[in-house]
Every structure is written in C-alpha cells, then in structure tokens.
Image: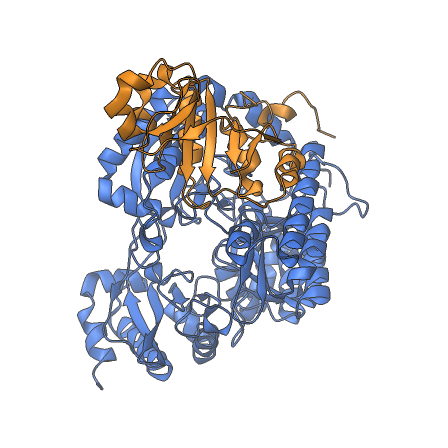
Amino acid sequence: MSPTAAARQIDPPANGLSSHAGIYHYDQVDRDFLKERVEQFRRQVARRLAGELTEDEFKPLRLMNGLYLQLHAYMLRIAVPYGILTSRQVRQFGRIARQYDKGFGHFTTRQNLQFNWIKLVDVPAILDLLAEVDMHAIQTSGNCIRNVTSDQFAGVASDEVVDPRHYAEVLRQWSTLHPEFSFLPRKFKIAITGSSADRAAICIHDVGLIAKRGADGTVGFEVYVGGGLGRTPFIAKKLRDFLPEDELIAYLEAVLRVYNAYGRRDNIYKARIKILVHELGIDAFRDEVEAEFARMPVAQYRLEPAILDGIRTRFASQPYEALEPISGILARARLEDQAFNRWVRTNVAVHRQPGYAIATITLKPAGGIPGDVSADQMDVIADLADRYSFGEIRVTHEQNLVLAHVRQDDLPALWKALADIGFGEANSGLITDIIACPGLDYCALANARSIPLAQRISERFADLDRQHDIGELKIKISGCINACGHHHVGHIGILGVDKKGVEAYQLTLGGSAAEAGAIGDILGPALSADETLDAIDAVVGVYLDQRQDGERFLDTLARIGHTPFKDKVYAAH
Amino acid sequence: MPLIDSGKLVDDAWVRLGDDDALPAADVPVIVSLARFHKDRASLVGRNGGLGIFLASSQHPKDIADHLADFALVALDFPKFRDGRGFTIARELREHLGYRGIIRAVGHTLPDQYLALVRCGVTQVEIPEGRDPALWAHALAEISTAYQVSVAGPLSMARLARHKKTEHAA
C-alpha cells in the first residue's frame, strides 16, 4: 500500500530507521548549543574535582544538569522533551546503562529517564554519548524551568483539539538556559495538553496549559497556575480562559517575573509558586501578572504563526498506510486469545488514523519495579518501535511507554514480543499500574521504601481476572511528603512516614489527576507495610461489595463516602 | 573587591558609603543605600563624582523609578548566588524603566552566572578576592546560542523563528 500523503522525513540517520519519529529533530543550532553546554559542564566538574568550586557552589550547577547526590551514588536524570524518543535514543540509553550503570534505567513521572548508579567523573562522557543522539540532562533539576511535559498521546489521540507538541517545543527552546529564570525561588514545572481528556495532569503543575480553539478556530490557551503536590498540595487555579497563541511566551514571562520577584525565599517548603498564589489569592496574583504583561514590549516576545510553522517543519510526520478502519486480523486474534483481548482492552487506545492504534507498554509486571527497564529490554523495545511504530517511543507520566502508531494488524505480534520480555501485562490503568517514587532504596529524603511496597501490591493483585473485575483504580506511592509518587492524586494514595524510626504508610482515598483534579483525604492512622497490603484489600473489598452498575472505584467512593472504607480498614484496630 | 566589566578586570573608582560615613571629596563617585539617598538627597545629587544607589534583593526597582536620572550606577545585591531576584530587577530596570547607566552585581555570584547577568542587563560584577578573573572572561564566550529574548539581545524571537524560511519536507 502507498503512504496516505508525502510524509515528512527529517535528517535520516545512518541506520535509516528513526527519521519518521514524531520528535522535534535538532538542527545545527541545537547541536552547537548542546556541544557548548556539555563542555561547560565538563569544566564545572573539573573545577569541582580540583577544589575550585565548593560543594555548596557546585550543587546548583550540577542540579541544573540533572545530577543528584542520592543515598548511595549520583543519579543522572535525562530530559525526554515532552516524553518522546526515537529508537536510536533508547538504544543509547541501553548502552549507557550497560557501560556506566548497573544495566538498567528508570522512567519517571516527569517522562524522564534516571540512571541511579553514576560516578561523577563519568558524567561528562555520558553527556557526550547523549549529545550524539541529541539528548541531554539540562534543567531536569534545580530551581529553574524544568523539562516541559505533555500528553503521551499528543498528535495521535482521537480526542485531540490541538497538537501540543509544537508548543511544548517552543517552550523547551524558550526555557533553555533562560537568563532571568535559572535561579528561581524553587523549581518550576510546565505541562501542556491539547485534548479534552487530560493525560498530562496539568492540574498539579506550576503552570498547566490546555491548548484549545476559539469560536473562530484560532488557537489559544487556558492557563492554570499554582498546582503542585509536596507537603502543601494544591490543585491549580485558572489564570486565563483564553490566552491568544501569539502571547504565550510574553504571558509566561510575566508569570515567571512575578514569581521570581515575589516568591518566598525564606523557606524551601514555601517557595513554590503555589504558595505565592495561595497567599496572594488568585485574583491578586492575576492582577500582578496582568500589570507586568501590560508593561512588556509584547511585540518582542510575539510568538508569530511563522515561528510555529517553522517548528512544525522539524517534526517528522508518519507515512501512514491507507487502511480499513477495522482490522479483521485484530478482531480474530481478540476472539481467539482471551489474554490478548484483555491487553487490547486496557492497553490499546483509539488512534485518529484509520486502521492504526496506540499501544501502551506498562512497565509494571507482577512483582516488578515500576518504571525500571533493563538495557536488553530497551534494545527490544527499540527494535519493536522500528518495526511497528516508525521508530518512535513515548514515555508517560504514569511511568509507562507508548508505541503511538501501530497498525491494528500488527497488535497481536507486538503483544507477543512484549510478553516475551515481561511487558505484556494487561494492566494499564488497573490496580497494579502503580506509580512509585524511588523511595528509601535510593533517595536521601525518603522516610520509607516505596518500591518494595509497590512490588508486594502488584504481587498481591497479580490475578488479571481480579484486576479486570476491579477496573480503573490508580495507586500512587510516595516515600515522603515531597510526593514524587503523586500520592495526593492517587485514587488510593500511599505516603511513607517515619513512625518513631519505623517505616509506616498513610493511606488517602479519592485523589485524582484527571481533568478536574482532586487531593485525596487521609483515611486514618499510618499502617505497617503488611497492614497496608491488607488495608488495600479491604478498600477494594468494600468497593466490590458496594458498587452499582458500571461504577468505577472513584464513583462508588463519591457516592458512599469514606466511612465504610475507614470502618473496614480499621475494624481490627 | 575585584571588579569585572565586559569580561575584564577593571579599576573600581566607586566608594561604597556607609549610612553614617562622611562624604568624600566631590569628585569621588559614591554608592549609597536608599535610606541615605532619601536622607541626604540634596547633598548627594549633582556631585561631580557621580552617584550610585545600592538596592537590596528585597527592594524593588519601583522604589527608585522616580529618581533613576540621579544615578549613574545601580548596585544590585546578591546575598546568596541562589537568590535570583537580581536578574529580574536588572531586566526591569532596562526593559521597563529604560535605565542606561551602569548596573553592578555585588555580593555572591558565580562565574557560571555571569553570562546570564549580562543578558539581563548587568554591566559590572564584583568578584570574590582570590578568584581567577579568567573564569569570568571565559564564561562570556562559553555558550554562544541564546534561544530567548533578553535586554542585551537578541531583542526578538529570531532564534525561535530560524526554521521559518527553511523547507524540510522530503
């Protein structure tokens, strides 16, 4: 069959495989910049090793390059711009994992990849390897504008109104080494979506953007500000209902300026923009932003349509075949194989191109570590992406991967190949599709371990019949109040606490990171790990007993309230 | 403190005057606090040596907006290099208030911040004693790509617009 249109292919790499991947393809300007940035960091490392920089002075410099000092080693966090990768980049991760880490990497809730066992002296060499494939670790940490995140189904979702990737790329370039906003009171996270369904959790970001169309078809943004988790969780508040496209950069500059000038610097836990917005009130905060915006030479910051057109030309398009909307091969395979059918139900989403599908690879095998992928698995996934999805791989904030352009005909073969490497689990959005932070196994801030608890929950609920019966139920685990595991917005949230020197876990119910967003309510006193497992069983039991026709867990909880759950969980206490 | 201007070590003629210090000879340029300026404005303005104002990171450019014509120099304090308010203050002085005099960063900054300071409109930086000034000179040339608008240039979104005339479709 012939491609539907002349698909754009950019800078074909030597292996000729990844040039249709839907990422922004670097030009010489980007590559020159990256080279200079790697050299700069190489010298910073040398100055630190020579004692010319104190650790206090080096810390923000290394953090701005994604390098943390954890419990046992350095951790390097690599930026995956709005979560989209090429197969070549994933293979390079595998190479780095083998050569400089313990043979695996860890995908995070920020759509990034972390290596947890890195030596400081190796970092410049690793950055060279990353630069070979147009990657880096810039602004994955530090008090600056962080790597922008987005909808993992961008550009292919059937419910999409505006493709957010091009705006995310504009934001990436604009925020890169921004001279004014690299020493903010605290970190600053921007998320953008262009769909009615929010898969990017914009309500828990410092700034959340929903790209949409006005009555006349022009693009604008609904702007939210001041969302965030941590010890003081807030759902973001609406700042503007429709910000015209060409004012995006000017307006964000105004927001950042108000934050940089007035955000608190006296207390690290009160330094996020959410606290400023909360203390001023959204109306007073908006007045400040609008006043700054009104003073700006807005024309200088104008995001002209031609800029976006230019950015769009750097995104390859995919040479889709003209296919029947319904695949007979897929339909037959679903009838013949219940296990496959189940995987399609949970892990496959509708693609806007007829005959294609979006496949989610959940990195949550029974008893596995959420988000961990070995170098060998990376290689296989890269090969599968080349074979079935134009060499493109995406990362989700739920610590899963996505192949976004799979022919429906190919789904059975793809699923078998994924099952061979342990990633064929039919559990996307189910109770074992758990988000977990690294916790006390790695992190110096943690009170409790997150990963072993996630593993035990996924073992306890491994029975797929039971998981599918339970349906959509999102568990999110954080090892401390910094909430990297998003526990506040888990349907069941689990927070690790230190109870007189013993690891314990506090449960919350009713959180959500979807459209409206909600912070969960604490169920009761903290529990041991064993008790937590039983408590989750008890919560699920109450839901299954009480649910009415087609209700999801959140629906039943909203109808009957917390008390029946609390009574059951603490009945034995 | 050694002083860097345009990447080079330069002599510093300016004297930081304490709030109770006596005024030096009229041709010696002085930097004073906002409090001293308001107290002694009559005797400070119009001195031959020039007048500079010291702005703490918690003070706001609007506090001096009405008097900017009096100042040949604004010294912005960086109590800690992590306190980035000075970047926004400098940019505001240039972009909103049209200030064209010297902006000097004083206090604790790192050579790694120098380029960003310059891009936000800072012209001079005091550096700690004993540090190699070459680091600052080098920092100016370290990163040659600026993706975004800044008061020291570029003044438009030209960098973001670089793709617009190129046709990449295969």
Q: Nearer the viewer, residue B6 or A528?
A: B6
Q: Nearer the viewer, residue A218 or A337?
A: A218
Visual colour scheme: by chain
State the residue at coordinates (32%, 20%): B65
Q: Is residue A169 visible?
A: no
State the residue at coordinates (32%, 62%): A552
Query: Which image quarter holds the N terminus of chain A?
Result: top right
Q: Residue A522: x percent and y percent?
A: 25, 67
Q: Residue A219: x percent and y percent?
A: 44, 27
Q: Residue A368: x percent and y percent?
A: 54, 74
Residue A244 occupies quadrant:
top left
User: In the current view of this chain or complex, which residue is farthest to the bottom?
Assistant: A572
Position of A233 compared to B3: left or right?
Answer: left
Letter of the chain in orange: B
Letter of the chain in blue: A
State the residue at coordinates (59%, 31%): B146
